[in-house]
């Protein structure tokens, strides 16, 4: 099953988090077998950079020239050898049998020979050889050690304020190392109750732990979220705690005058819209949720339907059908690289490139302009990304805000004062969540008031 998933991710750009549950069901796996299949799949995807560096030493061929099945079996076998308690002889034997089933007898000897070389050292031993020396090239070392493309390591260091000056050493990059390591941790499933229809206490009674900061959140440490009654009935859903708090922050800022019309500019697939719809109903307001893709708009409609206080429209947020200055509260949770959710989507680190960041910048700026224009004077706007990359966060805001004099930047960390260490290093009014600091996705939040 793990090999099937890896081949789909590599060959068809499949999303592991969507495909994995289907494959587990198709293969009739449960309990410890399902847990092992998940660890083999996600662990191999997370560690691919480190494993490829090791395989590059052990193999006399360029990995990109290998048959896809051979390449993925080698990665899968290397993960078992270097990052699990599976015995080396078992890891090698099952890998050889697996490639025989998928590619025949001929490549089996090659796989056997390579994995036997891998088995001669543990991970620490291989890193001494495969990674740049950390005193000479700390970012290069961390990129291999924590299995990230170097450009992502550099981007995280810049967002953390650890990349200025020359001659940086490991001690100057402690937080960068911490966030790269945190990306390889298995995150707990985080649930969010829909206000008015479920609450945190109900989720706790169902076996969850209360979230640290979100009054609507809970952590499901083990098991299937669909087994939680509130989730099965659509009164709660899976949503990262930082994502919940970004929506909550929008509703905490007071507005002068009416407060009955809210807008979600790009709502798919519906996590924040679900929470906002519940909060709107409780406040006597109505949410309009816009989504450009019809199939994603259907997901939003299903998510918000229990609240009964939301209308969903299929619309392009950069060419809005609504009147300007028509809303009291507006959120723009813009499409982004998703670098803030690498714990949950481990393949994204290998799928994204630095060029992708530049390519999406125009859309992000356009959606922020729409959001600002949609808010009435005195209204509140939230700009949210699931990425800490400066080109998707502070650079976007700097460019758009320089164009206008009718927007005041609000103190987002102060609105979420219960959450520690949210202030961005060089712009304290913006909020940045981090997995190593907060145990959440790396969500970025900025709040504004239209003047």
Image (cartoon, helix red, strand yellow):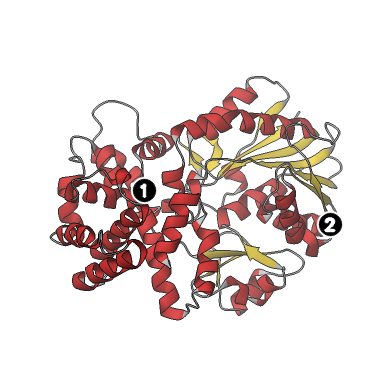
Q: Is residue 92 left or right of residue 247?
A: left
Q: Which residue lies under the disc numbered 2?
A: 309
| Residue closer to the observer: 112 or 145 | 112
Q: CA distance from mark 1 to mark 2?
A: 40 Å
| Residue closer to the observer: 13 or 235 | 13
Q: Which residue lies under the disc numbered 1?
A: 180
Label 1 element class: helix
Work out whether residue 426 can be spotted: no
At which x and y percent is residue 64?
32, 44
Q: Is residue 262 left or right of residue 73?
A: right
Q: Residue at x 31, y 56 (%)?
A: 70
Q: Is residue 365 left or right of residue 178?
A: right
Q: Earlier in the sequence, mark 1 or mark 2?
A: 1
| Residue closer to the observer: 282 or 208 | 208
| Residue closer to the observer: 338 or 120 | 120
Question: Above or below — where is 27 with respect to 294?
Answer: below
Q: Residue at x 86, y 40 (%)?
A: 257
Find residue 405 and report its image quarter: top right
At which x and y percent is residue 23?
51, 68
């Amino acid at each position: 099953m793990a090999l099937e998933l890896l081949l789909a991710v590599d060959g068809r750009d499949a999303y592991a988090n969507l495909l994995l549950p289907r494959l587990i069901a198709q293969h009739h796996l449960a309990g410890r077998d399902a847990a092992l299949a998940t660890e083999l799949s996600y662990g191999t995807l997370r560690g691919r950079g480190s494993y490829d560096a090791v395989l590059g030493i052990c193999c006399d061929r360029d990995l990109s020239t290998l048959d896809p099945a051979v390449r993925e079996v080698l990665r899968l076998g290397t993960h078992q050898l270097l990052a699990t308690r599976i015995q080396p002889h078992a890891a090698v034997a099952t890998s050889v049998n697996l490639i025989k089933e998928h590619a025949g007898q001929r490549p089996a000897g090659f796989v056997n020979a390579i994995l036997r070389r891998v088995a001669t050292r543990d991970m620490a031993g291989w890193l001494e050889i495969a990674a740049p020396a950390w005193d000479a090239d700390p970012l290069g070392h961390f990129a291999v050690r924590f299995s990230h493309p170097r450009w992502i390591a550099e981007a995280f260091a810049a967002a953390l304020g650890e990349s200025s000056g020359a001659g940086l050493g490991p001690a100057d990059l402690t937080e960068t190392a911490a966030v790269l390591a945190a990306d390889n941790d298995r995150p707990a499933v985080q649930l969010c109750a829909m206000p008015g229809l479920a609450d945190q206490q109900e989720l706790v009674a169902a076996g969850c732990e209360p979230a640290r900061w979100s009054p609507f959140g809970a952590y499901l440490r083990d098991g299937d979220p669909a087994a939680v009654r509130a989730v099965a009935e659509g009164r709660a859903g899976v949503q990262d705690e930082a994502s919940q708090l970004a929506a909550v922050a929008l509703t905490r800022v007071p507005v002068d005058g009416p407060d009955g019309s809210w807008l979600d500019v790009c709502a798919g697939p519906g996590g924040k819209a679900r929470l906002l719809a519940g909060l709107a109903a409780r406040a006597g307001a109505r949410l309009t949720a816009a989504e450009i893709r019809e199939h994603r708009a259907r997901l939003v409609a299903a998510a918000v339907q229990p609240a009964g206080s939301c209308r969903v429209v299929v619309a392009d947020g950069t060419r809005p059908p609504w009147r300007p200055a028509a809303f009291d509260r507006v959120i723009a949770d813009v499409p982004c690289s998703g670098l803030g959710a690498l714990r949950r989507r481990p393949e994204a680190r290998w799928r994204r490139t630095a060029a992708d960041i530049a390519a999406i910048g125009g859309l992000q700026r356009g959606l922020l302009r729409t959001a600002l224009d949609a808010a009435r004077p005195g209204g509140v706007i939230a700009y949210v990304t699931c990425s800490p990359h400066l080109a998707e966060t502070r650079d976007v805001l700097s460019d758009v805000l320089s164009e206008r004099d009718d927007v005041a930047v609000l103190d987002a960390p102060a609105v979420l004062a219960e959450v520690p260490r949210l202030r961005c290093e060089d712009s304290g009014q913006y909020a940045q969540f981090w997995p190593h600091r907060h145990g959440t996705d790396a969500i970025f939040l900025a709040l504004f008031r239209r003047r």
